[in-house]
Amino acid sequence: MRRKDLIKRLSNAGCVLARHGPRHDLYKNPATGKKQPVPRHNEIDEHLARHILKELT
């Protein structure tokens, strides 16, 4: 999955960028309080993308 598509899906689910890290960005779901790192690769492995979406939505 492309990183920008994952970010768009996270934003549509109400997640916000918590902070930038050196290699990952940390996204947070304010409704649940859960946080999840998102790597800065252009392409993110499908399994990892599904895991991030599952944890945050």
Image (tube, grey):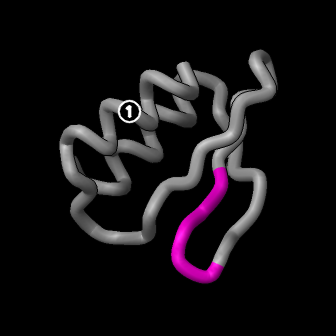
Q: Which residue sits at x=37%, y=54%? A: 4
The local crowd at label 1, few if under 14, some if 14 to 19, many if 20 or more residues have their Cα within 10 Å, is few
Query: In the depicted view, which residue is nearer to us: 54 or 43?
Result: 54
Question: Could you tell me residue 8's position as x and y percent?
Answer: 44, 40
The quadrant holding residue 33 is top right
Image position of 55 with respect to 8: above or below: above
Question: Could you tell me residue 13's position as x and y percent?
Answer: 56, 22
Question: Could you tell me residue 35's position as x and y percent?
Answer: 69, 40
Q: Which residue sits at x=26%, y=56%? A: 44
Label 1 sits on a secondary structure element that is helix
Q: Name the residue under label 1.
A: 51
Q: Which residue sits at x=43%, y=70%? A: 40
Amino acid on which the number 1 mark rests in the picture: His
Left/right placement of residue 22 relative to residue 38 reads right
The quadrant holding residue 54 is top left
Q: Which residue sits at x=51%, y=34%? A: 10
Query: In the depicted view, which residue is nearer to us: 9 or 28?
Result: 28
Query: In the depicted view, which residue is nearer to us: 32 or 2?
Result: 32
Total marks drawn? 1
The quadrant holding residue 51 is top left
Image position of 11 with respect to 26: above or below: above
- Magenta segment: 22-26
Task: Name the dominant secondary structure of the magenta segment.
Answer: strand
Query: Which quadrant is home to the C terminus?
Result: top right
Left/right placement of residue 8 relative to residue 24 reads left
Question: Could you tell me residue 49's position as x and y percent?
Answer: 32, 41
